[in-house]
Image (tube, rainbow, N blue to C red):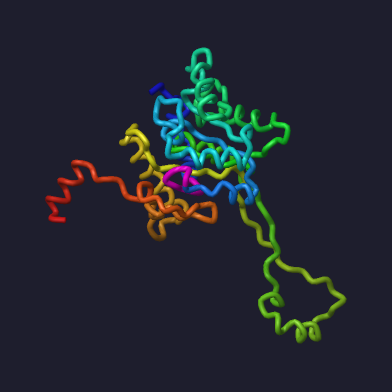
């Protein structure tokens, strides 16, 4: 695996903004995404990682089990609105762009050409430039970003997002007690303009970050486990401010974009490893 310098800087960025590693949705693989519902929800384009998300590592062909879901995705968003962004195919390490052409041929989707690895801001600029160049440009908040790595795919999606302060009028006394409207109208001077206090909140505006957890071929298990522990820690101590445990990451039911499927091979837990089996035997479990 090539050295990813932008990826090594992510832990430093987390000291400033730890929420970068928190995805908005977690699924086993893309078969559990309801693409038509995502389209109805206002998402018009998609960015996908390649290795262990759509293909096996260092392969250019789609994982056969994902064919129906991938076809539905391309049909829903449109072939040109689905972009593959990989740190291998299409990167500066792809001599002559041979792998990018192969991946694009086998997956029937464009592959981004970029000179810097995810999650660098240079790569983000290339993603934005691609979607801005379409006949019907797609904004950041109209994208979903799907990948299996927290420090690259999820961080890239969250770096593309911004937070806007939205002001909303606080509920009035009349709204809370509609039966008292008539009585209040008799007591108040109707000639004076009614004023409701304004409350403001910060709203995230940007791509929907979706993390896939299925590993089609064993790859960097220690780093993957470390990434998930970081996500759990941020969820518990930053998002929940130390109150309550982090999410149960074995539960894949997040929001209306999740597709309920009868897929035992996807929903089952992974078989415990050798060390875990020894520990269970030692504990008498």
In the image, farthest residue toward the top: 96
Give how far across and how far down residue 80 sits, in percent: 63, 32
Position above or below: 119 against 162: above
Up/down of 109 relative to 265, above or below: above
Who's the residue at 46% across and 23% down the image?
88
- Which residue is found at the position 43% from the left and 34% from the top? 63
The residue lying toward the viewer, choosing from 204 and 278, is: 278
Residue 175 place in picture, x, y as percent: 70, 75
Estimate the x, y position of residue 74 in percent, counting from the top left: 58, 38
Seen in the image, is 41 located left or right of residue 195? left
> Is residue 74 shown left or right of residue 13?
right
Percent x, y for residue 225? 33, 40
In this rendering, does residue 103 appear at all? yes
Q: Is residue 166 magenta?
A: no
Give 5 or 52, whichever is nearer the viewer: 52
Q: Is residue 26 magenta?
A: yes
Q: Quadrant of residue 246?
A: bottom left
- Please provide the residue range marked out in magenta: 23-31
- Please say whether residue 12 is visible from this viewpoint: no
Count of picture labels: 0
Q: Residue at x 73, y 68 (%)?
A: 196
**Image height of 118 relative to 186, above or below:** above
Relative side of 118 to 133, left or right: left
Question: Quick one: quadrant of the N terminus?
Answer: top left
The quadrant of the rendering that contains the C terminus is bottom left
- The residue drawn where x is 57% and y is 30% is 109
Q: Is residue 155 left or right of residue 52?
A: right
């Amino acid at each position: 695996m090539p050295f990813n310098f932008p990826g090594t800087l992510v832990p430093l960025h987390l000291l400033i903004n730890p929420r970068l590693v928190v995805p908005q949705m977690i699924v086993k693989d893309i078969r559990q995404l309801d693409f038509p519902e995502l389209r109805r929800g206002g998402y018009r384009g998609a960015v996908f990682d390649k290795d262990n998300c759509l293909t096996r590592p260092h392969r250019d062909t789609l994982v056969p089990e994902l064919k129906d879901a991938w076809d539905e995705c391309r049909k829903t968003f449109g072939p040109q609105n689905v972009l593959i962004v990989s740190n291998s195919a299409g990167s500066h390490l792809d001599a002559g762009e041979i792998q990018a052409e192969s991946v694009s041929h086998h997956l029937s989707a464009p592959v981004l050409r970029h000179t810097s690895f995810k999650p660098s801001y240079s790569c983000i600029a290339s993603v934005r430039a691609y979607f801005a160049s379409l006949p019907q440009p797609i904004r950041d908040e109209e994208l979903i970003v799907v990948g299996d790595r927290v420090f690259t795919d999820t961080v890239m999606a969250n770096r593309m997002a911004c937070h806007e302060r939205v002001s909303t009028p606080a509920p009035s006394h009349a709204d809370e007690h509609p039966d008292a409207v008539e009585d209040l109208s008799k007591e108040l001077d109707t000639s004076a303009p009614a004023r409701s206090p304004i409350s403001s909140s910060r709203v995230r505006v940007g791509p929907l970050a979706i993390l896939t957890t299925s590993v089609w071929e064993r790859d960097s298990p220690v780093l993957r486990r470390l990434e998930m522990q970081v996500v759990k820690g941020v969820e518990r101590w930053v998002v929940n401010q130390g109150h309550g445990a982090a999410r149960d990451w074995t539960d894949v039911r997040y929001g209306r974009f999740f597709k309920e499927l009868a897929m035992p091979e996807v929903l089952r837990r992974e078989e415990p490893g050798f060390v875990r089996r020894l520990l269970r035997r030692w504990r008498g479990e």
